[in-house]
Amino acid sequence: MTVLSKRITRLSESETLAMAQKSRELKAKGYDVINLSLGEPDFFTPDNIKEAAKKGIDDNYSFYTPVNGYLDLREAICKKLQRDNSLDYSADQIVVTTGAKQAIANSVLCLVDPGQEVIIPTPYWVSYKDIVEMAEAKGVYITANIENDFKITPDQLEKAITPQTKLFIFSSPCNPTGSVYTRNELKALAEVFDRYPQVYIIADEIYEHINFSGNHESIAQFENIRSRVIIVNGVSKGFSMTGWRLGYMAADNKIAKACTKLQGQFTSGASSISQRAALEAVLSNPGNTKHMLAKFKERRDMVLEMLEDIPQIKTNIPQGAFYIFPDISSYLGKSYDNNTISTAKDLCMYILDKANVAVVPGDAFGDPNCIRISYATSEDLLKEAINRIKKALDQLK
């Protein structure tokens, strides 16, 4: 009998990937399933980026890469951070990773010891919790509700910090809520962190370029806490490059060096061809992808308008990413065919079964009263999906 480690048996399966798998299985059986579970842009990678990858192949970039990434890519990321965010970093403060998820895992494992506390605002991206648990740390969760646009307050943050607190992880724009922290909101949080020099901050900025509220604001802009901020970003969302698996982090030299050391034992350097493509992406004019941003905003507005016609669903207006995180708690306790909808997961399975639409339960993100709907697909599919969801919910008693 195979006996697996406690570490892996405690680890949860990613709910977003699980719903996507269920969707694929039903499609394979001939069901007309619309998948709104994955956070994946439906646009193709821009041609100039694909050409850079092809040139990388022709130029024989086929050997092992430096663990922390090619120097020219790390220098390009520094230029991007200065150009887009007015932040000064040197190449030795950059680590290129196999997706932004690896940058987060590297940072957590390099900073946190067993038993230390990591503060995570709820709702949170699905993997934060499990990465912290793999590090044998304790997650401390601050609840942000829909009435507050799913954003925490400085007072909530201060009350959550203890002598055991080592790390704070958040995303802005946020997955799963689409919420975006303003400069003033980040400044207020930074003032709290300034009083607790033992606390480091992971700022997940992977949705930087999908922001409907104006310029992206980074908490790293505040000099008094800059050395304790780890910026995590990548090319997956803003440049429609999810399959290229290319992320990066920017941090204090000691943290970057530690993450390089850890990565050298796990994966070594990221794909050579992905790095050549990413070089083109980060150096290209950010305006080249504005058409994607405009389309995402149109879809957001359309889905919000359609959801208004569904009774008992509550929504806010997300200012970034490509998700809506509606409160569906009014449907909990309703029933169909002698079955009761007790949880958000029950509701998602009901929607998948009755409407052939895949969405993700909010439990996966720490909020059992919500579901996550991704609008990173065509308007026609979104219209059909929301109409199907409305029809299915109307049948609940």
Image (cartoon, rainbow, N blue to C red):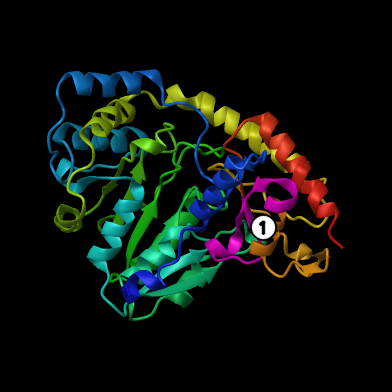
* In the depicted structure, whether residue 85 falls above or below residue 155: above
Residue at position x 33%, y 40% in the image: 245
Image quadrant occupied by the C terminus: bottom right
Examine the image and state in which quarter residue 275 appears.
top left
Left or right position of 179 against 130: right
Residue 153 placement (x, y as % from top left)? 53, 65
Q: Residue furthest front?
A: 1
Residue at position x 32%, y 50% in the image: 231
Left or right position of 66 against 309: left
Camera-nearest residue between 167 and 339: 339
Image quadrant occupied by the N terminus: bottom left
Residue 296 placement (x, y as % from top left)? 58, 33
Looking at the rendering, the stretch of residues picked out in magenta corresponds to 352-372
Q: Label 1 belongs to which residue? A: 349
Left or right position of 229 against 390: left
Camera-nearest residue between 24 and 331: 24
Camera-nearest residue between 28 and 23: 28
| Residue 105, magenta (yes or no) | no
